[in-house]
Image (tube, rainbow, N blue to C red):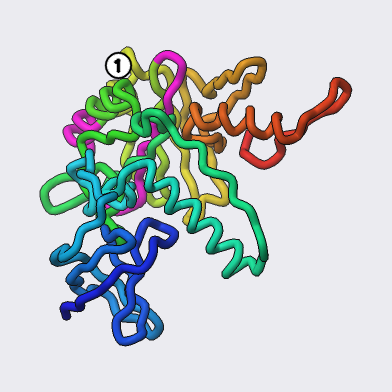
Amino acid sequence: MCKHLKLDKMVYGGEALGRYDGKVVFVNGGIEGELVDVQIIQQKKDYSRGNILRIIQSSEQRAAPLCKYFNICGGCQWQHIDYHQQLRFKEKIVYDQLTRIGGFDNIKIMPIIGMEFPWQYRNKARFIVKTTNYGFSIGFYRIGTRDVVDIDYCHLISEQMNQGYAVLRKIIKEGFKPFHAYCAIEIKALDEGIMVLFITSPNFHLNLTKIIDKIQNIPVIKGIHHLVVDKDESSARTVCSSGTAASTYSFEDITVQAQATSFFQINPIQAQRLFKKAIQLLDPQKDDYVLEGHCGV
């Protein structure tokens, strides 16, 4: 079913919102202000979802995505929009959620502090490993599904992480046997090298010993860990572990350590700016203590 829509605004998650016969339609890959033809792919009682068939009137803010997997992989939603305009859209989304959902009046949203180079910033990435009819797919979930897009390179992680991932992909695709359980590989950046964390469900029965033995010989890999988790990851147990167990991040006179399973800000450059801004707004005095009690470490 094809619909002719004017896209009214951007919403959380990077979709554009339009209306057809009064019903809301969320459009993947659209931009506020565009006029598009949309293929409806999902019908709900109160809304629909669609993909763009044709852009009739394009936004000046539309940009060419850097990644060849964009609009297939579910890892990124905003690459089709100029980065600086992305920030403005996200400010509007925060304002809309605070007023429409939160019920606040007369609020002031400070401008988002963006990055000079918004690529290769992530210090962690989780790649899903899934058996297919042709071997294995290793990558991220396809948009709106639990299928895995086979990905050989990600522009959001560093070159060093991509190099380590490429070697891991080759070893896993050659060494794994078909399985039907949850398995993921989490790669974390260290000061020198990377840490690898295998995350599997209890019903994953492949023996990872030979794979880990091969991985240990890769110079860039400084730590290897295997974690078995339940369905919602509320409990976990370490099966085997070797090498570096924690990542260290230093921000001026602040040093933090994140264990293999700990959460820390995935963008260290912006985390440093976040810490600085928090201290600036708090304006702590000489005898004050500042407790950071929310962000995992």
**Where residue 6 sits in the image (x, y, percent)?**
28, 71
Residue 174 colored magenta?
yes
Q: Magenta segment range? A: 169-192
Could you tell me if residue 145 is visible in this image?
no
Q: Vertical placement of 14 versus 45: above or below?
A: above
Judge left or right: residue 15 versus residue 1: right
Q: Vertical placement of 258 versus 134: above or below?
A: above
Q: On the image, numbered disc 1 is attached to which residue?
A: 218
Could you tell me if residue 32 is visible in this image?
yes
Circle 1 Cα neighbour tier, 10 Å, few/some/many (<14 / 14–19 / ≥20): few
Residue sitting at x 62%, y 23%: 256
Residue sitting at x 33%, y 61%: 32
Total labels drawn: 1
**Where residue 136 sits in the image (x, y, percent)?**
19, 45
Q: Vertical placement of 7 versus 127: above or below?
A: below
Residue sitting at x 23%, y 48%: 70
Which of the 4 image quadrants contains residue 153?
A: top left
**Where residue 175 sits in the image (x, y, percent)?**
21, 33
Which of the 4 image quadrants contains residue 26?
A: bottom left
Judge left or right: residue 259 versus residue 174: right
Which residue is nearer to you in this view: 289 or 37?
37
Q: Secondary structure at mark 1?
A: loop
Q: Vertical placement of 123 versus 46: above or below?
A: above
- Give the position of the C terminus as an image quadrant: top right
**Where residue 204 sits in the image (x, y, percent)?**
36, 47
Which residue is nearer to you in this view: 75 or 180?
75
Q: Give the residue type at disc 1.
A: Ile
Residue 18 colored magenta?
no
Which of the 4 image quadrants contains residue 23?
A: bottom left
**Residue, far right:** 287
Which residue is nearer to you in this view: 125 or 266?
266
